[in-house]
Image (cartoon, helix red, strand yellow):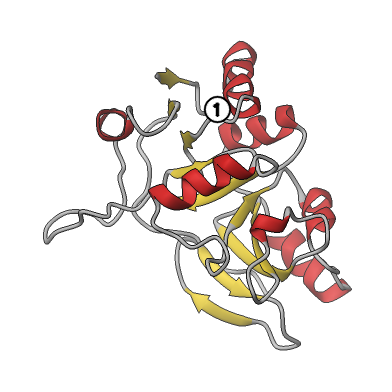
């Protein structure tokens, strides 16, 4: 199913439709402030496994990420946010950044890779934030890469119509929130004393 949602003012009834899909164990493709993502309710292990299969990821090895509504929700899933990290996140979120943190015991077991880390995002995208707000907990975030990428084609899918055409038989819902970007989020490892920039993507961190 393809569902068009207003990117600036998401319609409540349409967000409810998305929540119904998530609560029933469905897989969705949704817009963020960078590239389109594929995800599900993080508490549904079968759905998480399906997302990992679609993205060819090993859930025990991959660094899976969460879309959170705000820093307070991030704190529920991270081991500890010290003052320095909290200030950095407050300066930059919502925004196109993924922070790698030590995961807390709240993170579902399937999310616990061997390093016990989790990526967290608070994207500057009203649709993604409305979904998480209505669901009451984070959703899984995995970038929707073009695995069939060949020369002269973007690494990420940008047109929701094309996305629906390709994935309509593999996922339960594709959200059309406008064209997506081609640059992923900036990735910052905050699990050590010295923060490490793993990937420079969209956005410039305000230190």
Left or right, 107 with reference to 195: right
Front one among 70 and 100: 100
The residue at 11%/61% (across/down) is 151
Residue 79, position as x, y percentages in the image:
83, 68
Left or right, 2 with reference to 114: left
- For residue 119, what is the image quadrant? bottom right
Residue 76, position as x, y percentages in the image:
84, 54
Q: Quadrant of the C terminus?
A: bottom right
Residue 143, position as x, y percentages in the image:
44, 52
Residue that numbered label 1 is attached to: 8
Residue 195 visible in the snapshot: yes
- For residue 190, what is the image quadrant? bottom right
Q: Secondary structure at mark 1?
A: loop
**Label 1 Cα neighbours within 10 Å, binned few <14 / some 14-19 / many ≥20:** few
Q: Is residue 54 above or below residue 136?
A: below
The residue at 48%/46% (across/down) is 51
Q: Residue furthest top?
A: 13
Q: Residue furthest front?
A: 46
Q: Quadrant of the N terminus?
A: top left
Residue 49, position as x, y percentages in the image:
53, 48
- For residue 87, what is the image quadrant? bottom right
Left or right, 110 with reference to 201: right
Front one among 149 and 113: 113
Residue 204 visible in the snapshot: no
Front one among 74 and 77: 77
The residue at 48%/36% (across/down) is 30
Q: Is residue 182 above or below residue 6?
A: below
């Amino acid at each position: 199913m393809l569902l068009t949602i207003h990117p600036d003012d998401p319609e409540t009834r349409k967000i409810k439709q998305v929540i119904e899909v998530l609560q029933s164990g469905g897989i969705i493709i949704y817009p963020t402030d960078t590239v389109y993502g594929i995800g599900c309710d993080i508490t549904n292990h079968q759905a998480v496994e399906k997302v990992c299969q679609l993205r060819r990821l090993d859930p025990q090895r991959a660094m899976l990420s969460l879309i959170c509504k705000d820093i307070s929700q991030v704190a529920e899933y991270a081991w500890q946010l010290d003052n320095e990290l909290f200030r950095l996140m407050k300066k930059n979120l919502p925004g196109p950044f993924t922070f790698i943190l030590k995961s807390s015991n709240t993170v579902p077991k399937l999310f616990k890779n061997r390093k016990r880390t989790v990526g967290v995002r608070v994207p500057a995208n009203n649709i993604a934030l409305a979904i998480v707000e209505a669901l009451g907990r984070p959703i899984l975030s995995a970038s929707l890469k073009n695995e069939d990428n060949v020369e002269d084609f973007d690494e990420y899918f940008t047109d929701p119509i094309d996305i629906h055409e390709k994935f309509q038989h593999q996922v339960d819902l594709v959200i059309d929130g406008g064209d997506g970007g081609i640059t992923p989020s900036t990735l910052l490892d905050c699990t050590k004393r010295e923060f490490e920039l793993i990937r420079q993507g969209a956005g410039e961190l305000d230190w």
